[in-house]
Image: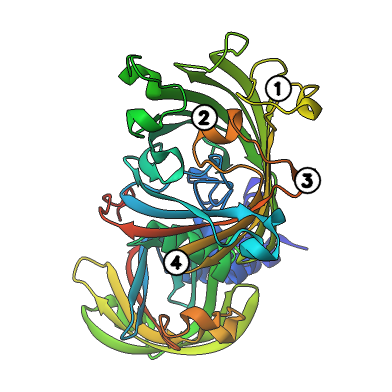
Amino acid sequence: MTTKHLLIAALFAAPLTLAAQERYATRTGHISFHSDTPMEKIEAHNHKSISVLDVSTGAVEFAALMKGFEFEKALMQEHFNENYVESDKFPKAVFKGTLTGLNADDMKKAGNKEVTVQGEMTMHGVTKPVTIKGNFTMEPTGAIKATSTFTIKPEDYNITIPGMVRDNIAKEITVKVQMDYVKM
Amino acid sequence: MFRPTFVLIAALFCTPVILAQDDLLDLLGKEEDTKEFTSASFKTSRVINGHSLENTAHGVLDFKINHRFGFLNGGLYEWFGLDQAWVRLGFEYGVTDRLQIGIGRSSFQKYVDGFAKYKILRQCESGCDMPLTLSLVAATNMTTLRSSELPWYSEGREDYFTHRLAYSFQMLIGRKFSDALTLQLMPGVVHRNLVSTLEEENDVMNIGAAGRVKLTKRLALNAEYFYVLPGQTLAPEVSADRMDDPNPGYKNSLSIGFDIETGGHVFQLHFTNSTAMNERGYITETTGDWLKGDIHFGFNVSRVFTVYRPKAKVTG
């Protein structure tokens, strides 16, 4: 190997590295879920979700600790962790996906953009493919606000709801995601 | 040849970054361990008669409806005890996550009782390393029977208010070993202001042990036993065959039962040889003998209401 080869290698590596650094992240993402039935309204909020977005590749990942979801009623929270999602065994919900409908140029100018995220959600030990629609708002400051609302079915993730409370818990749970990304 | 080497090193540093894109979340580094206390050691604040490691959460009111039916050995004539029933109605409230207070009223001896329970140490799940929970329980009870119905009262004798009182202090030390198993020890002392004979102690030292095995997500098996140190109690009327008991006439309290949880309710169904539902009664004055079939079927129903919502401790 000559010096020239090394230089060429370095030149190839450099731009890639730069591009790969177009990353945005948050540690204080807000994820909430809502179950609405005539019998009972249940909602829980997690303000400590983490997420990383790589604009150059469109890769986006989310993670939330199940124990980080706070309920209105202490007992609901205990039951959620103990009986439904079994937080001790499956402490985290993770989503990994790819974003379409947004490119690096869009990120540079302020504005609104509809996006589609395709990927896999892992929760309660079950991994399912999901497609989610979302909205990105590029702030003039360079920060990015992302929001999304979608529904999931507890049964898809092996979360069983006993007959006695079946009328109290919605078949489809609405999940709301709100992320305020800043550049890494 | 300084420069090429430098470039080579730079190139080596760049490559891993590109590969690492697989796991973006790792870029944020390790999450801080948030302090998390162990929850759900027991389904409710009582094992059966005795207190458990659990408190009602801050701002939660727990309404307790407890029943003890008659002895099973009453047979078919007494419908295996169901013809008789003693009731205790109680309210318990979580003043903070550590402090719980409660009051209750029983039909047995027309007892009124009150208690405070404070968690000094809390078993830790993550972010700290406390291996066990330690609570103190201070309880008092008083009979509200009419003077004429009090066992120690007779014509011309003064009915002192203080004679109606008894106290109990317990320390609960326990650990949730796994999702399935929780064990606790309960050393304590019951103080009775008035006892029936000179031979009896006013302060009765005792130690209890309790545990639960979780069978399914919503069903658990509980058991508790209270051992009274020998020579401290003596029942007013003791039959000859019971004189060689360590505490003649009285038995140690043993209870076994199931916890069934359904949303906002916990149903506790159990068998016990104790009739009373306060410490004085079940620790020092249990007369039932398991071996003779002096067993009560009983249940506790716990219904919780969230009356106050503490402000969320974590904010964005």
> What residue is rendered at 55% in x and 61% in y?
B83
Q: Label 2 belongs to which residue?
A: B280
Instruction: Name the disc covering residue B247, or none.
Output: 1
Residue at image location 53% in from the left, 46% down from the top? B46
Q: Foreground mark, 4 or 1?
A: 1
Q: Name the spot of residue B257 as percent of width and height, x first.
A: 66, 55
Task: Look at discs 2 and 1 and give the one toward the viewer.
Answer: 1
Residue count near mark 2 (Cα–Cα under 10 Å), binned few <14, some 14–19, many ≥20: many
* Residue B292's disc number: 3
- Please name the residue shown 43% across and 76% down the image: A55
Q: CA distance from mark 3 to mark 2?
A: 23 Å
Circle 4 — which element? Answer: strand
Which residue is located at x 67 percent, y 29 percent?
B250
Of the residues shown, which amino acid type is indicated by label 1?
Asn
Q: Nearer the viewer, mark 4 or mark 3?
A: 3
Q: Residues within 10 Å of mark 3 (few under 14, many from 20)?
A: few
